[in-house]
Image: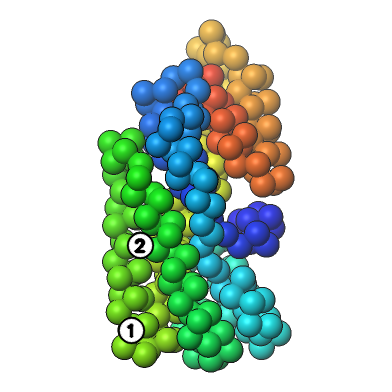
Amino acid sequence: MSRSFLEKAGLSCVCLLATAGVSACHDASSDPMAVLLTEETRSALATEAHLPTLASLAAEARAEESLSGPMDLWEDSWQRPLPEGRALRLEAYQAAAPRLAGALGRAGVEGSVASLDGVLDAAGSLDAESLGPRIAQHLELAREEQVAAATALREGREAEALVRSLQGSDILREVGPESVVRLLIDQADGALERLEDDGPRTAGVDLRRGERLIRGARLALESGDYVRAIRRAFYACQVLGVQPD
């Protein structure tokens, strides 16, 4: 994961909408961000709800030093395959939650649960047909975590509520813009490598343009400009004859 992603520590509604835009690209051949221009998505974009992370909550509680181990584990988890990454994130949360929940107090834990709820409510305003099955499934799983978090909070189990809200946030983060960009770049890279190996059979494919778009997508990703990164990576796939997933 890029440093900007980890430092900003929030997946806002704009990130989910950008991801939904990629899912709708199959019907928006001229511009993968076309779905972002509808009145429906403008209203969701305006909410600017941010998801919590372990790092952001530790900073709020002024507990970064005491929670440096779980925070490092959380960061490392994003470099691992999904099942292993999820297991590491749960380990990090279980190690940090008792201390962090105490430092934040009930109001701080309530804020974490409410942030997840706000993003899910905004995402719920999207046209369900514009969301691919992967995003829809993640939204459903995240809502289950939010409901469990709210229940735990009502019953006075603040540490569990914190773990659940963070897990739900990360389930959404898995289909957030950085994950989408990296998936598209990997697809374009694979196509470029295959086409270069094919030699003469690549007639009519602008390999150099595809390569420039991939490079531009990476640069935009590193700068945290997810919309531009998604657009460039999507166009790279188009140029190289790949149907983005």
Residue 176 location in percent, x, y?
49, 50
Give the structural element (helix, strand or loop) at label 1. helix
**Image quadrant assignment for residue 213:** top right
Q: Tell me the residue at 50%/12% (across/down).
A: 201
Residue 132 location in percent, x, y?
32, 40
Residue 142 is tagged as 2
Residue kind at label 2, given as amino acid type: Ala
Residue kind at label 1, given as amino acid type: Arg
**Image quadrant assignment for residue 63:** bottom right
Q: Tell me the residue at 35%/42% (across/down).
A: 126
Q: Tell me the residue at 61%/19% (across/down).
A: 207
Name the residue carrying label 1: 154
Is the N terminus in the top left, top right, bottom left or bottom right quadrant?
bottom right
Residue 140 is tagged as none
Does any portion of residue 50 appear in the rendered image? yes
**Image quadrant assignment for residue 127:** top left
